[in-house]
Image (cartoon, rainbow, N blue to C red):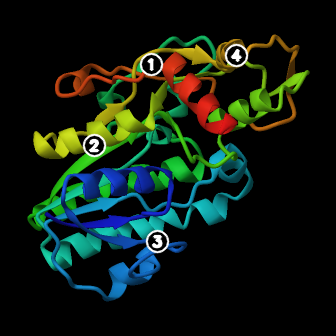
């Protein structure tokens, strides 16, 4: 297929690009940092090329510090995603992937100790709850625009990744930061927040494979991309340090941003067409091996 890939130099985009190339697709990339055609926002405003598939990874996020510390910058995603939907309608592109986010879910469902696995139906697009910061707001708004793009003839696959991780991820995100501290054998070992905040970690290989499986099997979504395994930050630190071969004291930074307290997917819809293959322990081992060179 002729594929447009925005955000091609980002974390998900780089891995998707590699797999799309491996499968023999013709990929046109669009990214501020490394691209054939430059800034995605400007591209959507002026381009009228019709691709067979458009995968929209471009986003401004940058980890929890950026989400909490730069709300207006992150809110630029409102323009980016709305222009993507307008471009789909104008070009009559027949199929697209829109990456929403677990941040689109109502924060009231993600309190400490809630134990609630987020299901796709927890977001009512007609009457949504409060999402997580302006990043969640932008992604929720993008989902609300999807029906308008579909009314113009574009089939949109909506995916909601949980906490993705893997090689070449920015150290602004928790997982690579944890790996880096272990490689440096830091003691005490610093964790932002209480350490009790819980996430659902999914390896980038599974994010990519699930995305392309959704396209191949015509699964429109929304679909959670997660494993359903609840892991606290303290538990992640223990796994990382155990695999690294040392036992440091954990030091909690209660003054640092830590986000919602319990964000775990119900993966039932995902398991209907794809089953994640990389366990958290295996993902940690791979990351440590890459870090050691």
Q: Nearer the viewer, residue 275 or 84?
A: 275
Q: Residue at x 17, y 46 (%)?
A: 215
Q: For residue 279, which numbered disc appears in the image?
A: 1
Q: Nearer the viewer, residue 264 or 1?
A: 1
Query: Quick check: marks 4 and 1 in contact, CB under 8 Å?
Result: no
Mark 4 and mark 3 lie on one chain; the one further toward the N terminus is: 3
- CA distance separating discs 2 and 1: 18 Å
Q: Residue at x 49, y 60 (%)?
A: 59
Binning the other alpha carbons within 10 Å of mark 4 as few (below 14), some (14 to 19) or many (20 upward) gives some
Q: Which element type, helix, strand or loop, lies under badge 4?
A: loop
Mark 4 and mark 1 lie on one chain; the one further toward the N terminus is: 4
Q: Which element type, helix, strand or loop, lies under badge 3?
A: loop
Q: Which element type, helix, strand or loop, lies under badge 1?
A: loop
Relative image position of residue 263 (x, y in whole percent): 52, 25
Residue named by callout 4:
196
Q: Residue at x 46, y 71 (%)?
A: 31
Q: Is residue 113 above or below residue 21?
A: above
- CA distance separating discs 4 and 2: 30 Å
- CA distance separating discs 2 and 3: 20 Å
Residue named by callout 3:
31
Front label number (2 vs 1): 1
Mark 2 and mark 1 lie on one chain; the one further toward the N terminus is: 2
Residue named by callout 2:
211
């Amino acid at each position: 297929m002729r594929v447009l890939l925005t955000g091609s130099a980002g974390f998900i985009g780089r891995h998707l690009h590699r797999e799309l190339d491996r499968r023999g697709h013709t990929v046109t990339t669009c990214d501020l940092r490394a691209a054939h055609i430059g800034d995605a926002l400007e591209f959507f405003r002026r381009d009228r090329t019709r691709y067979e598939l458009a995968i929209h990874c471009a986003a401004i996020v940058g980890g929890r510090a950026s989400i909490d510390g730069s709300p207006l910058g992150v809110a630029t995603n409102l323009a980016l995603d709305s222009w993507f939907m307008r471009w789909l309608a104008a070009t009559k592109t027949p199929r697209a992937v829109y990456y929403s986010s677990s941040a689109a879910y109502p924060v009231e469902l993600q309190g400490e100790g809630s134990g609630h696995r987020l299901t796709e139906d927890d977001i009512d697009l007609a009457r949504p709850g409060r999402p997580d910061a302006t990043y969640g707001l932008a992604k929720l708004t993008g989902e609300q625009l999807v029906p308008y793009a579909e009314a113009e003839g574009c089939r949109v696959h909506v995916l909601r990744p949980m906490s993705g991780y893997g090689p070449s991820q920015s150290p602004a995100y928790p997982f690579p930061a944890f790996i880096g501290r272990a490689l440096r054998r830091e003691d005490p070992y610093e964790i932002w927040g209480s350490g009790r905040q819980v996430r659902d970690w999914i390896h980038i290989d599974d994010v990519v494979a699930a995305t392309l499986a959704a396209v191949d099997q015509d699964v429109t979504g929304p679909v959670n991309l997660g494993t359903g395994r609840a892991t606290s930050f303290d538990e992640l630190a223990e796994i990382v340090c155990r695999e690294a071969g040392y036992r440091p004291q954990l030091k909690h930074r209660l003054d640092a941003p830590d986000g919602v307290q319990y964000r775990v997917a119900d993966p039932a819809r995902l398991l209907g067409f794809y089953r994640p293959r990389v366990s958290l322990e295996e993902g940690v081992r791979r990351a440590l091996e890459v870090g050691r060179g």
